[in-house]
Amino acid sequence: MNNNRGLWVAVIVTAGLVVAFAGGGLAWLGGTPAPLAILAGAAGFAGFVGLALAVMTFLTRTQG
């Protein structure tokens, strides 16, 4: 995984964008005002990317 770390970060960030758009869009469709829906999407992005990067870091440090 160390050789492909940049690729994994790109995949994680791309998946985080999908989570953010889905979270913000569903919040907006559910009747949440647009600014709060944007914040919901941003929170989903930050939570997903933060957790995924923490897991990636943990896995790379335990392998070697």
Image: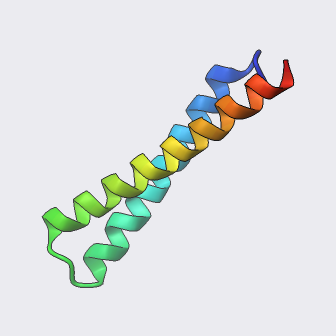
Position in image of residue 16 (x %, y %) = 49, 48
Left or right of 43? Residue 39 is left
Position in image of residue 48 (x %, y %) = 51, 51
- Point out the image quarter for the N terminus: top right
In this figure, what is the number of numbered marks?
0
Farthest residue, direction right: 63
Q: Nearer the viewer, residue 64 or 1?
A: 64
Residue at the (40%, 47%) spot, across then down: 46
Compared to 36, does 29 lie above or below? below
Q: Can you tell which quarter of the image residue 60 is in?
A: top right
Compared to 55, does 20 lie above or below? below
Residue at the (34%, 55%) spot, across then down: 43
Q: Can you tell which quarter of the image residue 2 is in?
A: top right
Residue at the (14%, 74%) spot, across then down: 33
Left or right of 42? Residue 3 is right
Residue at the (59%, 37%) spot, across then down: 54
Position in image of residue 24 (x %, y %) = 32, 65
